Image (cartoon, rainbow, N blue to C red):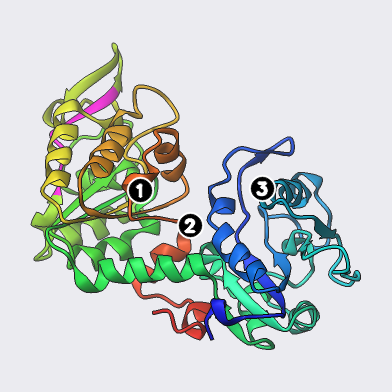
C-alpha cells in the first residue's frame, strides 16, 4: 500500500522531530518542514493522525521538561493551521471530536521504548489502524516506534523517507560519473567502513576534519596538535595501500592555528605546534574544481571547525560550489544542513537527507529492519 491510498483511517505517524530547541524555542525546523507533505497528504484523505517522535536522549521513565515535545506540538499546530491534541501519556484517551491530529509526548520518556518492549509496542499500536513511518533518522534503530509497532500494524512509508531512499539509491545504483564523495568529521572510527565501501564506487574522495588528519598521519605527514585517532592510523594505512588509494585527494595547504596566530600553512611546513582547523586556500580551489567536473556529489560532514571563523571558509565555499554546479547532489549529516540553509542554498541540492547514522548505515549496506519491511532498498 502507498501512503496516498490510506483513507478514513486512524494513522500512527512516526516522525523525527529531534530538532535543536533552547528554552522552548526551535532553532532549526528543517526536520519538521520535511514532514509537511506526508501530514497534509494524509489529512487530505480524511485520516485522523497520531504523531509520535523522540527528542534527545532522556532517561526512560522520568519527565524532562527541556525534552518535551509540547513546544513542537504548538509550533506544528501554527504551521499546519490545525488544532493538535497533546497526549502526555500513551494510556490517555485520544479524542478526535474536535481535532484531526494528536501528538504523543516524547516516546523516549516511556520505559521500554529503546529496548522495543513488546507490551509498549502493542499499547502504542492499539491507538491506530495503520502505521506510517517517515523518520529516516531513526531507521537504524530497533525501538517500539520503529520496528516494534510495525509488528502489529500494516506499515507504510511516508513521502519523505520514500523520496530520500529513492534518491540515495539513484546515487548508489546509477553511479553517474565522475562521482565525488566528501566525507568529514571528527572521528574516522565512525566512518571507516563507509570510506572503504564508497571508495570503490567513486572517482574522487575528499576527506576532512579529524578523519583527514588521521589519514595524513598514516601517510607520514606531521599534523602537529591536530585531532586524530591514533587507534585507526593502521586502518588508514591499509586503505592507502589498496588499489583505490589514488582516488583520495589530499590537500596541499591548511588553515591552522600556529604560535604566531592563524595562518595558511603548506602541508609540508606544518610544525609540531600547529593545529589544523580547515583547508587552505589552494586546497579549497582544487576541491571546487573537482566539484565542477563531477556529475554527482555525496557530502557528509563539515570540512573544518565551522563553529569558529575563519575555519568555516572551506565548508561554506564547498557548499556554494555544489549548489552552483548542475550536478546530482545529496547531503547528509545534521551539522552540514544548517550551514546550507543559513547560506540559503537548499534549493541547489537534489536531496538534503534527514538521516545521520541511518544514512551511513544504509550506504554501508548495514541492517535497517524497518527499511526492509517497507521494501525500500
- Please tell me which residue is depicted at 34% across the width and 35% down the height of the picture: 304
Going from N to C along the chain, the mark reached first, 3 or 2, is 3
* Magenta segment main secondary structure: strand
Q: Which mark is residue 229?
A: 1
- Vertical relation: 10 (above or below) 219: below
Camera-side mark, 1 or 2: 2
Residue farthest toward the right in the current orientation of the protein: 93
For residue 107, above or below residue 330: below
Judge the density around disc 3: few (<14), some (14-19), many (≥20) Cα neighbours within 10 Å.
few
Tell me the distance, in whole angstroms, between the alpha carbons under discs 3 and 2.
19 Å
- x%, y% of residue 34? 53, 56
Q: How many marks?
A: 3
Name the residue tied to disc 2.
Answer: 354
Q: Secondary structure at mark 3?
A: helix
In the picture of the structure, the residue carrying the numbered disc 3 is 79
Residue at (53%, 48%) from the top-left corner?
30
* Mark earlier in primary sequence (1, 2): 1
- What residue appears at the point 79 percent right and 69 percent down from the top-left corner? 111
Pair 3/2: label in front: 3
Per the image, label 2 sits on a secondary structure element best described as: loop
Front residue of 347 and 114 = 347
Q: Magenta segment, which residues? A: 249-256
Is 214 placed left or right of 302 in the picture? left
Looking at marks 3 and 1 on the same chain, the residue that comes earlier in the sequence is marked by 3
Amino acid at each position: 500500500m502507498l501512503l496516498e491510498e490510506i483513507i478514513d483511517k486512524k494513522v500512527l505517524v512516526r516522525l523525527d522531530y529531534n530538532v535543536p530547541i533552547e528554552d522552548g524555542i526551535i532553532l532549526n525546523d528543517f526536520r519538521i518542514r520535511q514532514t509537511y507533505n506526508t501530514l497534509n497528504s494524509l489529512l487530505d484523505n480524511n485520516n485522523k493522525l497520531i504523531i509520535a517522535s523522540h527528542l534527545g536522549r532522556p532517561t526512560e521513565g522520568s519527565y524532562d521538561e527541556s525534552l518535551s515535545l509540547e513546544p513542537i506540538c504548538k509550533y506544528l499546530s501554527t504551521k499546519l493551521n490545525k488544532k493538535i491534541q497533546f497526549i502526555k501519556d500513551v494510556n490517555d484517551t485520544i479524542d478526535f471530536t474536535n481535532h484531526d491530529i494528536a501528538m504523543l509526548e516524547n516516546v523516549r520518556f516511556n520505559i521500554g521504548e529503546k529496548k522495543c518492549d513488546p507490551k509498549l509496542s502493542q499499547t502504542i499500536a492499539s491507538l491506530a489502524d495503520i502505521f506510517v513511518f517517515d523518520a529516516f533518522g531513526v531507521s537504524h534503530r530497533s525501538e517500539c516506534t520503529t520496528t516494534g509497532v510495525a509488528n502489529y500494524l500494516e506499515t507504510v512509508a511516508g513521502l519523505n523517507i520514500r523520496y530520500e531512499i529513492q534518491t540515495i539509491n539513484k546515487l548508489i545504483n546509477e553511479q553517474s560519473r565522475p562521482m565525488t564523495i566528501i566525507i568529514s568529521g571528527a572521528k574516522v572510527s565512525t566512518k571507516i567502513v563507509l570510506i572503504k565501501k564508497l571508495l570503490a564506487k567513486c572517482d574522487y574522495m575528499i576527506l576532512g576534519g579529524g578523519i583527514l588528519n588521521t589519514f595524513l598521519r598514516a601517510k607520514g605527514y606531521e599534523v602537529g596538535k591536530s585531532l586524530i585517532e591514533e587507534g585507526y592510523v593502521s586502518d588508514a594505512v591499509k586503505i592507502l595501500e589498496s588499489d583505490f588509494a589514488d582516488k583520495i585527494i589530499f590537500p596541499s595547504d591548511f588553515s591552522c592555528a600556529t604560535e604566531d596566530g592563524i595562518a595558511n600553512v603548506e602541508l609540508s611546513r606544518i610544525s609540531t605546534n600547529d593545529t589544523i582547523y580547515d583547508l587552505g586556500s589552494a586546497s579549497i580551489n582544487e576541491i571546487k574544481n573537482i566539484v565542477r567536473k563531477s556529475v554527482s556529489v555525496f557530502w557528509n560532514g563539515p570540512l573544518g571547525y565551522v563553529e569558529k571563523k575563519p575555519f568555516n571558509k572551506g565548508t561554506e565555499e564547498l557548499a556554494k560550489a555544489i549548489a552552483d554546479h548542475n550536478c546530482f547532489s545529496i547531503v547528509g549529516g545534521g551539522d552540514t544542513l544548517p550551514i546550507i540553509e543559513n547560506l540559503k542554498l537548499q534549493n541547489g541540492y537534489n536531496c538534503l537527507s534527514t538521516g545521520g547514522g541511518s544514512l551511513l548505515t544504509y550506504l554501508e549496506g548495514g541492517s535497517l529492519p524497518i527499511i526492509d519491511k517497507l521494501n525500500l532498498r
